[in-house]
Image: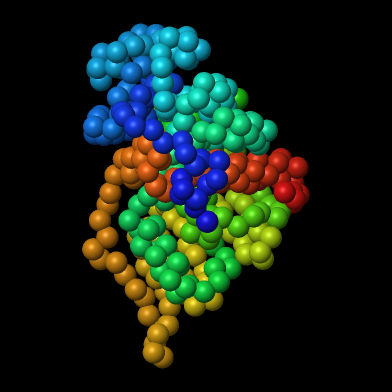
Amino acid sequence: MILSICENDFLKGVGFVGKLKVGIIGAGQIVEVTHMPNYIKNSNLVKTVSIVDVNIERARFMAEKFGIPEYFSSYQEMFDKVDLDAVSVCTPNKFHAEAVIAALNKGCHVLCEKPPAVSLAEAESMTAAAKRNNRILTYNFHFRQGEEVQAVKRFIDAGEFGEIYSARVSALRRRGIPGWGVFTNKEIQGGGPLMDIGVHMLDTALYLMGYPEADYVSASSYQKIGNKPGVGLMGSWDPGKFTVEDSAFGFIRFKNGSTLMLQTSFALNMKEQSVMNVELFGEKAGASVFPPVIFTEKHGSIMDMQFPFIQEVDKHGRSIKNFINACLGNEAFICTAEQGLAVQKIIDALYRSAEMGKPVEL
């Protein structure tokens, strides 16, 4: 189950009085549109005091745009010169682990963008650093913050699904290869749609299922479209530099006997332009989460339960606000370091299974 700060032993007693002093590592789009606007919204609790980017002009631009007092090209320099309580790590995936561990070792709580890392070994080192330094490490799996997810979760917690014994995860784009950034570079990102969008729906499903422990996985991945010229709905890409999978399909069996089927793509010849969904199958009821519909039977009738008044919320905003509250010692529901490690373990195994062409035990 997801843990709150008060339920996780090694996080007890980490709160403090006063505004949270935050530093940002990475100055890309996710910082500009998500992290900084939400830190500013919570300016009664937080002050962003520094930002880092290897491109010092980009760091300067962001500092000037958002009124951040200090900017640097090296996070080591930032840690040497600025007193911080917490850090957002928003670099490309390859650089997550090093930055996160450095921040934790400096006594900072850390909110890291997803996925945790590019390898299981890195995620293990990050989790160990959080425990060793008695600091919060969480990941921005913001989909679990949605009203849709929380509505379904309340029904699950009330026992109305019974045992959830299977799930299906879809994170699919018909022609949604990002035409910017490093999303198609395996060396920097560690993978393609599984790492980028599949990870969100995987975390959401695991959260709703109570984060069961994985037993083994079987997967296949393909590079059939991205390595050729084509029409893109998210900008043009360079086929010669497309080194990630454009689709991946997997099966996960958990030690409690439940299963999960996963399908994810940047490019796939399918009907819809995009599908992001989690489907759950329980002994008493099932659900499709985005948008939420519960499938059940009551009083001799088969029925669908819909939620017409579910409102769209700022999931990123909730995720960042919960991180702030957790750092301040208030109870807040966040993705724990252990849950992030569990996600990374499954992703790592799926890629290994696809590469070897056979199931992989965890």
**135 with respect to 66 (left or right):** right
Measured along the vertical axis of the image, is residue 262 above or below residue 237?
A: below
**Res 249 seen here:** yes
The part of the image, by quadrant, that contains residue 341 is top right
What x and y, as percent, mark residue 294? 40, 70
Q: Nearer the viewer, residue 131 or 256?
A: 131
Foreground pick, 10 / 62: 10
Q: Position of residue 276 (x, y in %)?
A: 42, 51
Q: Position of residue 255 (x, y in %)?
A: 69, 60
Q: Residue at x 24, y 32 (%)?
A: 44
Name the residue located 33 percent from the left edge and 18 percent from the top edge.
Answer: 49
Answer left or right for 362 relative to 269. Answer: right
Q: Quadrant of residue 210?
A: bottom right
**Closer to the camera, 330 or 229?**
330
Q: Is residue 13 left or right of residue 43?
A: right
Residue 54 seen in this snapshot: no
**Colour scheme of the rendered structure:** rainbow
Please determine whether, in this image, residue 279 is positioned above or below residue 305: above
Q: Image check: 311 left or right of 286? A: left
Number of numbered discs present? 0
Picture coordinates of residue 258, whole percent (x, y):
62, 64
Which residue is rendered at x = 49% and y = 77% of the image? 284
Which residue lies at the image location 37% right of the left edge and 49% below the top edge? Answer: 145
Vertical placement of 358 versus 97: above or below? below
